Amino acid sequence: MDYSDYIPDYSDYNYTNEDNFTPHEEPVFHHKSNCLEEAICLSLLVTSVVIFLLGFCGNGLVIWICGFKMKKTVNTTWYLSLAISDFVFCSILPFNITYTVMEEWIFGRFMCKFTSIIMFLNMFSSIFLLVIISVDRCISVMFPVWAQNQRTIKKASIVVAVAWFLAMTLSIPSMIFRDVDSHMGKTICFNKYTLSQHSHMLVAVIRFLVGFIGPFIIIIICYSIIILKLCTNRMTKSTKPFKVMTALVAAFFMCWLPYHTFILLELKHQDYDHSLLNTGIRVGTCLAAANSFLNPVLYVFMGNDFKRTFKSSMLSRMENAMVEEDHTISRFLSRSSSMDGRGSTRI
């Protein structure tokens, strides 16, 4: 369950550039996993299994509804792409759950690199898509007439393709640095920063800036503008949009801040207790993974009245939620367009 430089047995071995490391051809002892006997490891393991089940099923339902049951729109394009990203990530989780339990990598070098690439691809693609959704909503509120004319499925698909391309590009370091070796009687999948002494710092800082700070600032700005606009709009009487937006920003912040915090602390690992870093990165990566099942909850289910959940099926709820948002945006754009039309007539 890791996007990170974390390996189950946290040691200096994971921090070095590996210049002085000589793998053991004959293990000194046979490794025995202790994860199921440790409270923290067991708790994170159970949490990861829950994240896998909820994320796999939740995102699978979103993919089915958006891809096969609903008319294709700009909004369903965003939701479908986000769900695919989170679904692919959840599909890879069993490999890392197994790694956590055994504390030994048994899937070979290719899968070590592949699972890491998929995880960072999910991290960047989902974050970029959250930014795209935020910007799209902001533009629809600030420039309704322009948005009504320019928001097309084709353009949305192009934007999604660009986001996935950037995410794949930023995932390349996982292919370069991820490796498998034997150490202390066990096989591990780890990051081997050998290109230069600054490789580790460069990768961590870029991921922090591009994968957290930059997107978080953009999301905050977009939703601040939306909230201000809604506050001055006499047509808006419900407080539901404010609650949803607050939940979105809070979830993004809480899921990703711990992960990036401990990854940056790891750059100065000699100044901190290794067990603290180990626990921090484990918890941080688990919270980051939780974002994969929170996305469908926040973007789909939260848009509906909770009391009606028991009166209709789960699939109907999801479809109604997204149809409702499309209709809401369409009504807002239509009213704003007519108001602008009346304004121009007066002039």
Image (cartoon, rainbow, N blue to C red):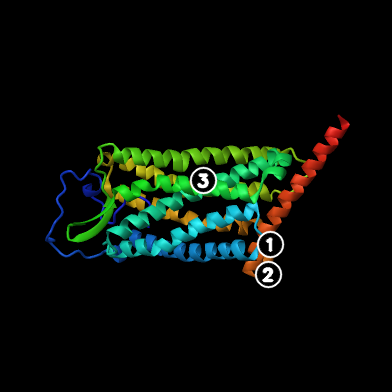
Q: Position of residue 76 (x, y in %)?
A: 62, 56
Vertical placement of 174 versus 102: above or below? above
Query: Viewer-proximal residue, 100 or 316?
Result: 316
Circle 2 crowding by C-alpha within 10 Å: few under 14, some 14–19, many from 20:
few
Badge 2 amino acid: Ser
**Proximity of marks 1 and 2: CB atoms separated by less than 8 Å:** yes
Mark carried by residue 186: none
Q: Residue at x 83, y 38 (%)?
A: 341
Say which element carries label 3: helix
**Proximity of marks 2 and 3: CB atoms separated by less than 8 Å:** no
- Ranked by sequence position, the earlier of labels 2 and 3 is 3
49 vs 150, left or right, is: left
Residue labelled with disc 3: 162
- Ranked by sequence position, the earlier of labels 3 and 1 is 3
Q: Is residue 252 visible?
A: no
Circle 1 crowding by C-alpha within 10 Å: few under 14, some 14–19, many from 20:
some
